[in-house]
């Protein structure tokens, strides 16, 4: 390389290095800007976590809820409504509960659906079919019922359940049992709209089952 070439190279080198540095810096900024934003998962109280985990096991095992209900894509034969999103349900259970039983929290509504299936009947499903899971053969105790309700109510929910939610669910158990007993014996308890009429109603979640099966589990 001659003297003129050497001088030209010496003059261009700083410009080339500056351009490369700028390009690298821009790449770093772009990379930082495009980094995914992580959203924190709700932190659950240990008692709530245990209840949800226990409820999930019961739902898919001894309570046999999944014989007739899906939760999203999990579960078997669809006799009752999907308790997640799918099979004609486009909202999670907690959202449907808020629209159909605004006076109850989602977990209280789940308890009612579990113990008093005919309190509210979802459109296109028949009353008098679903078997309450504190009856035989499942015969869950009160704590197990609260656990199943916690699993159903927590599925797909953005806000985590709290110990207070479990307390409200436990308090709803005798209320739902009393309403069911009054309905069975023709007592004074008033059914929710559409219950026991043999027809469906748009006011009911009642995720009850249809056809001739006698499943157990939440609606």
Image: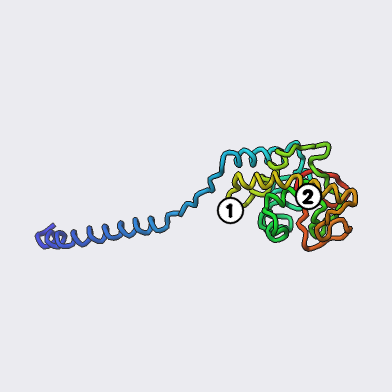
Residue drawn at 85 percent across, 47 percent down: 181
Count numbered badges in the picture: 2
Q: Residue 168 at x, y = what percent?
A: 67, 47
Q: Residue 84 at x, y = what percent?
A: 69, 52
Whole-Å distance between the Cαs marked 2 and 1? 26 Å
Q: Residue 191 at x, y = what percent?
A: 83, 56
On the question of residue 79 being in view, the answer is no
Left of 167 or right of it: where is 37? left
Residue tagged by mark 2? Answer: 78
Residue drawn at 83 percent across, 48 percent down: 180
Q: Are the residues tagged 2 and 1 within 8 Å (C-beta)?
A: no
Residue drawn at 76 percent across, 57 percent down: 205
SS of the residue at dot 1?
loop
Q: Residue 201 at x, y = what percent?
A: 81, 62
SS of the residue at dot 2?
loop
Q: 24 or 175: nearer the eye?
A: 175
On the question of residue 89 being in view, the answer is yes
Q: Counting other residues with Cα less than 10 Å from the Cα at mark 2, is it few (<14), some (14-19), or many (20 or more)?
A: some
Q: Earlier in the sequence, mark 2 or mark 1?
A: 2
Q: Which mark is residue 133?
A: none
The colour scheme used to paint the residues is rainbow
Q: Which mark is residue 158?
A: 1
Q: Counting other residues with Cα less than 10 Å from the Cα at mark 1, is it few (<14), some (14-19), or many (20 or more)?
A: few
Q: 179 or 157: nearer the eye?
A: 179
Name the front one of labels 2 and 1.
1
Q: 44 or 183: nearer the eye?
A: 183
In the rendered image, the residue lying farthest to the front is 188
Residue drawn at 16 percent across, 60 percent down: 9
Quadrant of the frame with the N terminus: bottom left
Left of 68 or right of it: where is 147? left
């Amino acid at each position: 390389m001659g003297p003129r070439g050497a001088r030209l190279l010496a003059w261009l080198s700083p410009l080339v290095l500056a351009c490369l540095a700028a390009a690298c810096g821009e790449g770093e900024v772009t990379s930082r800007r495009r980094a995914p934003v992580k959203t924190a998962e709700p932190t659950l109280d240990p008692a709530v976590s245990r209840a949800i985990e226990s409820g999930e096991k019961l739902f898919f095992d001894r309570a046999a809820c999944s014989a007739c209900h899906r939760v999203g894509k999990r579960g078997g034969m669809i006799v009752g409504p999907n308790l997640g999103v799918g099979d004609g349900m486009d909202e999670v259970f907690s959202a449907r509960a808020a629209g159909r039983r605004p006076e109850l929290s989602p977990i209280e509504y789940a308890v009612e659906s579990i113990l008093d299936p005919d309190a509210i009947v979802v459109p296109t499903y028949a009353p008098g079919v679903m078997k309450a899971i504190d009856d035989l053969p499942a015969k869950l105790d009160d704590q197990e019922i609260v656990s199943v309700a916690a699993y159903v109510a927590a599925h797909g929910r953005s806000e985590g359940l709290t110990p207070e939610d479990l307390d409200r669910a436990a308090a709803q158990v005798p209320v739902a049992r009393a309403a069911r007993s009054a309905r069975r014996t023709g007592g004074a308890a008033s059914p929710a709209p559409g219950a026991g009429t043999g027809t469906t109603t748009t006011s009911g979640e009642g995720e009850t089952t249809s056809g001739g099966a006698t499943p157990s589990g939440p609606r």
